[in-house]
Image (cartoon, grey):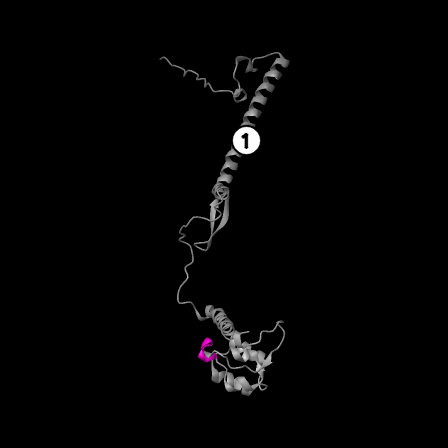
Amino acid sequence: MNTHEPEACIELTSMPQLVEAIRKEDDWTGTKDAAARRRAQTRLNMRAYRKRKALAKKADDNHMSLVKQETTIDLWDIKQEFMSSVAYSHAKQIYDSKMALLPYGTNINQAKIIFPLCPDHLITLLQYNALRALSVNRTLISGILYTPLECDQEIIHVVPYPSNPASVPAALLPTILQQTVPHGDWVDLFPSPEGRDNLIRALGTFDEDELWADCIGG
């Protein structure tokens, strides 16, 4: 009976210490000369070190390139009235071309203004309209009023009837009381003849600053 012993198999693999070997003289494994062996090992180690440095630099460059691409700048879109983030390179193009504003665009996340506005939004508008109306009235009757040179100068006067009544709106023409009873010039700005007479009759019985706050809102 014949028996066959299995043949021994030898696995051939690359030697990890020779990964960076390029030329025959880089193989130091069979070198008996210690100095030559050290030179070969040093050469391989330096080659591996330079390769690692190159790979690390490439990775850093890729990372910096990615960061640069992701860098954004916030700009105000005057048409849409919201902040928009644009790429750094795009922002530089806008600046270089003297186009400081973003082109018109849409933003799905933009908050919409819903009308009608709630009453709180109208408080400032009411104050503005009241002040504007009084300013216009002052201009309309400026021809029959004395204009003080100092802002803090208080005017107590009677108002003469205009020589040309058609130049003044009927609601602002001075009443008999305005023409005969000294009063503050602020009374003449109210667009109601009856209201002006009531104010003149009540002068001294109320606080003028409180009336201003009630009418204008502070």
Relative horizontal placement of residue 208, taking residue 81 as reference (left or right): right
Q: Is residue 85 above or below residue 138?
A: above
> What main secondary structure does the magenta stretch of the protein show?
helix
Q: Is residue 71 above or below residue 132?
A: above
Q: Nearer the viewer, residue 111 or 163?
A: 163
Relative horizontal placement of residue 125, taking residue 181 as reference (left or right): left
Image location of residue 18, percent across then percent down: 53, 19
The crowd level at tag 1 (other Cα within 10 Å; few <14, some 14-19, many 20+) is few
The quadrant of the picture occupied by the N terminus is top left
Q: Is residue 147 above or below residue 178?
A: above
Q: Nearer the viewer, residue 93 or 71?
A: 93
Q: Secondary structure at mark 1?
A: helix
Is residue 167 found inside the magenta-colored segment of the image?
A: yes
Where is mark 1, residue-wise?
57
Q: Nearer the viewer, residue 127 or 163?
A: 163
- Tally the marks: 1
Q: Nearer the viewer, residue 59 or 8?
A: 59
Image location of residue 215, percent across then percent down: 51, 77
**Residue lying farthest to the front in this orientation:** 163
Looking at the rendered structure, the kind of residue marked 1 is Lys
Q: Which residues are magenta?
A: 166-172
Residue sitting at x 59%, y 22%: 46
Is residue 29 found inside the magenta-colored segment of the image?
A: no
The quadrant of the picture occupied by the C terminus is bottom right
Image location of residue 40, percent across then percent down: 59, 16
Image location of residue 33, percent across then percent down: 62, 11
Residue sitting at x 53%, y 77%: 144
